[in-house]
Image (tube, rainbow, N blue to C red):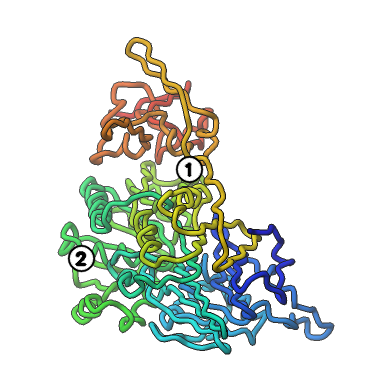
Amino acid sequence: MSDRMSASSMPVGEANSELECFPYGVKHGDEGVCLMVKMGPYRILLDCGLTDISVLQPGLEQPKSHGLLVATNLPVDLVLCSHAHPDHAKGLLSLHRAFPQLPIYASEATTRLLPLNWLDEDGKIPQFCQALPWRSPVEFQDGLTAELYPAGHLPGAAAILLTYTTGRRTYTVFYTGDFFLSNSRLVEGLPLEELRGLEPDVLIIEGTYGTARHPHRRNQENQLAERINRAIASSYSVLLPTSTLGLGQEILMLLRSHHNFTGRNLDIWVDGSVAQGCDAYLELLPHFPTAVQNFAKHQSLFWDEKVRPRVRRLPLEQRGIVGQSPCIAIADNVTDLSQYCQPNTGPWLVLLPENPGHPNEFQPSLLTPHSSPLVEVETYLLAQHSDGPGTTQLIHNLRPKHVIFVHGAPTYLADLASLEELRNRYHLHSPAVGTLVDLPIGDVFVQPAAPETNYEGELNELGTVVTITLPDAITADPRWRNFADTGLVEARWQGEDLVLRGLSPRELMNQNGARLAWTDLNCCATCKFQRGQRCWNPESPLFGFKVTPDGYCPAYERQDE
């Protein structure tokens, strides 16, 4: 059904069927999303999160004069951008420069947020992206239309319905981009009721969280707010590195409206491109939900030094001193954290957003030996994508013929593609980059065998010790590293089944803001050199490595009482 091809060999003049999808990027890892959908004679590029667009440039020639690249053949007929995050939009500026006559479209809010992807560019970014309305089909070519629906996730984020009509029938492709069914502080969720029963021929859907199930969004917010509150009460400053758009602004609105912080004498500092993202949001107030617009009538969404907690921009010269008294700082996720965690500041709690399928690895290089002597690092969940039940809910409501999973760790997408409730109803695909997906409509389809997800092991009981032996395939899975991180598990009964779950260092060491275990042991949890779940003793063989609470080395020294 699918042929392995290189991107440069993608056929553009011939069609095996009326519908095909060729992925230039599917975000299995760090690469962005970039999908070429062919509907009859038309080629539509969905997003361009590529940092290198050379795979899209077979028609470029280098003329002998002026040294400029000139496009001789367009790689596609048009480009549709779902939203302004870099993993979906970073390559658009390069694409426009290479093919200035190539039309690029997005929602109005997205067109205005896109320039934040190129803050390092000299000069003004040209307005190359054309705005499309919500919920109104726009015809681009004879028989080819697109219609945008709000997708949740980010202001301006769009799910896209493509329709191609021939004399014989109509073909439809629905692309979610990044979607979120739940309402967040600044964005209303995807309007599921408007799309119910759409029955597209093809659904291209993100699977960021695989089959994982999350608590309700409000519970996630409360857990984050409570953790920050405990840290401030313990005289810690809190540093939250985030992306330019979305999460940082959501956290600001949470802190300004949560009962733990309203009216509190506390400073919230916003630094770097996150502050520029806040400025861009303030220019988009008519695009926000009514409740947010009403809030903005009485006080600023972000910048306010009169209402407590105070929200301020962080001047560059103050980076190294803001943590001298407890405060909250929101900074770029690529920032050198040692700029904030200085020796005369702290203690600090660094909170990193969970990265599903690609766990956050806190790098020792982010903190220098001159950093604050006490820095703790934890992760938190404040999801901006739907979880597994939300993903399957959207699929069942849309009732497509084909489902293409993108945007997620391969193991997470494989989990979704293995669900019986989906395999029994839909044609499922989870292509790698460069794999052409032919999408026959009306043909008899035999679903390929599901990847193995159930494994047999052995259980041995000897006195008070129970040993469970599992096959190597379990430990070969990338998720094993997180599961076995501490070497400890939690077991609970679920009906007649016993469910095992790996315990994380955060749960062992930071539950209720206190270290509840290991206090009487000579172990890493009580060693003076253990900070941020890593060893910071240059004399130790564990220096720079992540350590488990019950670890020990010859260079152990107990913390001062």
Q: Quadrant of the N terminus?
A: bottom right
Residue 550 in the image: x percent, y percent?
A: 39, 26
Q: Residue at x 32, y 38 (%)?
A: 507
> In which quadrant of the rendered view does residue 517 lie?
top left
Q: Is residue 106 left or right of residue 254?
A: right
> In which quadrant of the rendered view does residue 488 lie?
top left
Q: Amino acid at mark 1?
A: Pro
Relative height, residue 550 to residue 136 (above, below): above
Question: Can residue 450 be seen in this snapshot?
Answer: yes
Residue 120 in the image: x percent, y percent?
A: 55, 72
The numbered dot on residue 412 is none
Q: Residues within 10 Å of mark 1 (few under 14, many from 20)?
A: few
Question: Can residue 338 be seen in this snapshot?
Answer: no
Residue 512 in the image: x percent, y percent?
A: 23, 40
The numbered dot on residue 369 is 1
Residue 338 in the image: x percent, y percent?
A: 45, 51
